[in-house]
Image: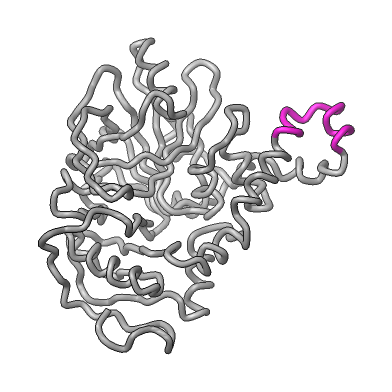
Amino acid sequence: MHSNLRSFLDLLARENDLVRVEALVDPYLELAEIHRRVIERGGPALLFARVKGSRFPVVTNLFGTARRIERAFGAKPEALVRDVVHVAENLLPPRPSKLWEHRSLALEALKLGTRRTGRAPVTQVLDQPARLDELPVLTTWQEDGGAFITLPLVYTEHPTTGKHNLGMYRMQRYDAQTTGLHWQIHKGGGFHYHEAEKMGQPLPVTVFLGGPPALILAAIAPLPEDVPELVLASVLAGEKIKVTKNPLGDFSHRLVAEAEFALVGKVPPHERRPEGPFGDHYGYYSLQHDFPVFNVADSCISVAAAILLVVWSMESVKADKEAKSSVKVEPAEPTLPTETI
């Protein structure tokens, strides 16, 4: 499995399964409309080099075909996750008796977890103060409540035990320093926030964008409570996940070294703002509700000079009046349609 997003993109480019779009594209509806036309026809992954209002490119449709899913996660990702969970449950914690009992899995134990590194792509650029309005966050449907980050890897730690969680919760950008955080109490991150809120404390949160495909799979996998997501990610990747010290030094969270972005902030207690509506993958708009607020004030965005990973499902809301973009996407393979897609 690829150790970072760029390695995966390089593979797709070599296989003519990635198209670079040089035309200036608007993140408000236009980029999403192009994406939908391409994915409906089984088209390639798309790298938008110029996005209006941002200096960062956007890549979409990375997992839009079974072939690309296999390239990212292996031939049978569901079976692989089951096997990895079995390994983790039998080796955690790695006591000598367990290692001997499951000695055939002992080599896998050496790959579990994280390892520190001093040099990390994610710390190449430090934007402080953080400006979320400089990110090319997309509005994908006409009735959406705003622009949403749709593939965030949200890292939290329990305020008393320190146990971590890596989840995926959509984030509606409100302004340059705040977003909504769509998590519920039964989710790992939501539970950590509930515990911190009971103590009257803000919960430190680090949001990773991009990075090893193994992290994406681990964040959405239905894991038992005693199997940490970073442990699963390390076994999926076949190596320990590289982490590095936060350059600010005032947050306890280490950063995933191969992430493209790390958004560092806090979720204050007893603060809610309306979040939504959002054109969801179930095929209709999820309604507006109050959710906690992620705040990057007095914090930073750490950047790997950088590609923003944005993916969402095509099986979503069907718009009555959908604007059409004039941008043409050239087919990556001869089997794709030759007309504008």
Q: Quadrant of residue 60?
A: bottom left
> Is residue 117 visible in the rendered structure shown here?
no
Q: Is residue 15 covered in magenta?
A: no
Q: Is residue 338 above or below residue 308?
A: below
Prevailing secondary structure class for the magenta stretch in the rendered image: helix
Foreground residue among 170 and 173: 170
Image height of 198 relative to 130, above or below: above
Q: Quadrant of residue 305?
A: bottom left
What percent of the width, then of the height, locates residue 86?
A: 71, 39
Residue 144 in sight: yes
Answer above or below: position of 53 versus 154: below
Q: Is residue 100 magenta?
A: yes
How far across and down, in percent of the image, does residue 34 sit? 25, 69
Foreground of the two, 318 or 254: 318
Magenta residues span 89-102
Q: Residue at x 27, y 77 (%)?
A: 22
Q: Position of residue 240 (x, y in %)?
A: 65, 46
* Residue 205 x %, y %: 39, 32
